[in-house]
Amino acid sequence: MTNSASTASIPVATLGVPRIGPRRELKMALEKFWSGKIDEAALREAAAKIRADNWTRQRDLGVTVIPSNDFSLYDQVLDTSAMVGAIPKIYGWTGGPVSFETYFAMARGSQKGLSHKDSGDHDGCAHGHSHGQGVPAQEMTKWFDTNYHYMVPEFSKDQTFALSSTKAIDEYREAKALGIQTRPVLVGPVTFLKLGKGENRLSLLPKLLPVYIELLNRLAAEGADWVQIDEPCLVLDLDADEKAALKTAYSELALKVPGVKIMLATYFGELGDNADLVTKLPVAGVHLDLVRGKGQINSVLDKMPADRVMSLGVIDGRNIWRADLTRVFNFSNDAIALRGADRIQIAPSCSMLHVPIDLDQETDLDADLKSWLAFSVQKMGELAALSRALSSGRESVKDVFAASDDAAKKRASSPKIHNPAVQSRAAEKSSALSERKSAFSARQKLQSKVLGLPSFPTTTIGSFPQTEEVRKARAAHAKGQLSDAEYDTFLRKETETAVRWQEDIGIDVLVHGEFERNDMVQYFGEQLSGYAFTKHGWVQSYGSRYVRPPIIFGDVSRPKPMTVGWSSYAQSLTTRPMKGMLTGPVTMLQWSFVRDDLSRDQVCRQIAFALRDEVTDLEKAGIGVIQIDEPALREGLPLRKGDWKAYLDWAVDCFKVSQAGVKDETQIHTHMCYAEFNDIIDAIGAMDADVISIETSRSKMELLDAFVTYKYPNEIGPGVYDIHSPRVPEVPEMMELIGKARRNLSPEQIWINPDCGLKTRGWPEVKSALSNMVEAARQARVA
Ligand code: GLN
Ligand code: ZN
């Protein structure tokens, strides 16, 4: 795209683009490679094609600062471990270039082991790795507060580093050969160390920096004039050592790599108390997230040395909404006035890894909704138009601005989004809405009378195996090959079999098995107003696992009951209590793209009211035990500790609104997957669910400590069996875990259940394991 204006145009950067390919080409290639259908050369070729397409697409759309090394076969943090040779001994690496075999062993465990399951939907426990024989994969955890997961670097005490992958150089060259000058992207040394594990990691910095220096000098020799170094840790609370490490790192790089200019990228929040530090770092440019950190612009620009190039992250790189260009234009113009046009770049707030690729692929979306959205391709278009407007005036792109203004206006008033009844209900605040009628101790007595459960009651977390057969039937139904009636009959049969089987082995509180559900968020989202779904809107969750997050675009309400039919049917099959099963408001929010025209707490509250109606309808239909899953509660914690309380206050209140409409006799359960509970134990206490089930088996009940210290008064089901592995635990193992729980909790508090849902498991192992679990409970009752 050429710019006819006389003024030099403002550079447009992207910081990074999605690497999965518009039709998930990367996943296809990886899976073929892993199953031996294609060789390494073919995988490399497929990857090179994606990169070339990404570069040319960016160039054609008007991006002028094009990244390289933003691509990854699996994960950019894993790439960094490979780059610096931070490869734990168990992978058998002895130096030299890191092979695909080593790289993928770190990503997924070795071939000899059991590879992890890509179940393709939420299990909430994204550490779904093998725990069997063979070499395990590296640990995986969330990248800041996104739903992207990175492979946690591991550092040993005697860790050494050496440049062990030339990926950054190779990809720079590859682009150059296509005639495209790029700005290579690296994960910064301090963020890399901070995100890893191993004692005293920061002290490794002096050993790590020479590798960065060598690499940067080689990039310079190849012709790279700028590099982008990502230090998103700069938006976190940093201690004095971490701040000192940043100073050391960037002073060293400035000194030893004079030939390359560094664009220091910060994102996912504002710099806050790290702003002073950043202004002092000797780097050529700084990128700011001005979507999440809008308010920091003036104070940061004021302090920043005058020669520093500022990259303004003005387009949301994490969400899918079309920008209000007029607003962004005015905002950017003010910044330019402060700084001077020759020292400004514009960019998305962060890498666009977190958004789908191209909205044009969505042919079935509502036309209005579509006009309010922008995926990565559209965002580049917005940036290009913005750049043009900033250098040559809005007149030069007036059609683009007119369309943006029009969309913003329509969105602000569309009845598809705005439902006054929903809004006024969500605005209601009273403790009567959040509190159960009586305190837990009174409820417990009533519930125990009504339910008549034995001590150490047994239950499961909800889902039973989503077998090949179940998936096939769902797919056939979606394609119209199976009629509604046939599909319904199939699901009823599956449910009935599961109910009979639970009765046979003697589980106390049954579940219907969730066979009708594709995914624990999608299933509800599809039945709620205000939610939409894409066909191709995939984003990388980790490695080759991609998700299509639902889009919460409007006020959320529940047109009709969502689960009452299935739960009542299942209850009709048995005299034992059948547990109703819902996904909680915070999890419904966390695992979706959320509208940006309403605060998250308000959106969550709307969902809470929709669920409240479902909960009371279930109760009316005779369901006396209802579980509201909140596996995402902890991951919603803001990046800065100072923001935690406000979040937890509204998150807990939303949960309470969803549960509190029932009578005292109705027992409300909640479930959370493996999580560090210490930080949120007060919040869990405040949630006041009658029963909480948690994942504790792999920590050998250590996770219970938080509950013990807190003196958690309500009932609790600490998982006694690890559902992430097909291994069947024996009765004595479970007895041991139950024993630990008994030593710390009172016997009336304890439930016996697995760690999580069983959807990723097979029936044979589930049957053996649950039979053992019921036997363990029996033994506990007489012990
Ligand atoms: N009820 C859900 C299930 O059993 C809960 C899953 C989760 O918390 N991740 O599948
Ligand atoms: Zn779980």
Image (cartoon, rainbow, N blue to C red):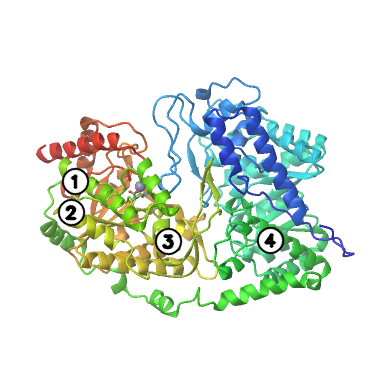
Residue at image location 63% in from the left, 73% down from the top: 407
Please tell me the numbered disc located at residue 718. Answer: none
Quadrant of residue 100 in the image?
Answer: top right
Percent coordinates x, y for residue 771 in the rendering? 20, 37
Quadrant of residue 467 in the image?
Answer: top left
Q: How far apart are marks 2 and 3 (CA)?
A: 28 Å
Q: Which of 34 and 675 is in front in this view?
A: 34
Q: What residue type is labelled 4?
A: Val
Q: Distance between the residues labelled 1 and 4?
A: 65 Å
Q: Name the residue under label 2.
A: 573
Q: Name the residue under label 3.
A: 525
Q: Distance between the residues labelled 3 and 4?
A: 40 Å
Closer to viewer: mark 3 or mark 4: 3
Determine contact: label 1, label 2, CB under 8 Å.
Answer: yes
Q: Is mark 2 on a helix, strand or loop?
A: loop
Percent coordinates x, y for residue 741 in the rendering? 23, 41
Q: Name the residue under label 1.
A: 500
Q: Residues within 10 Å of mark 2 (few under 14, many from 20)?
A: few
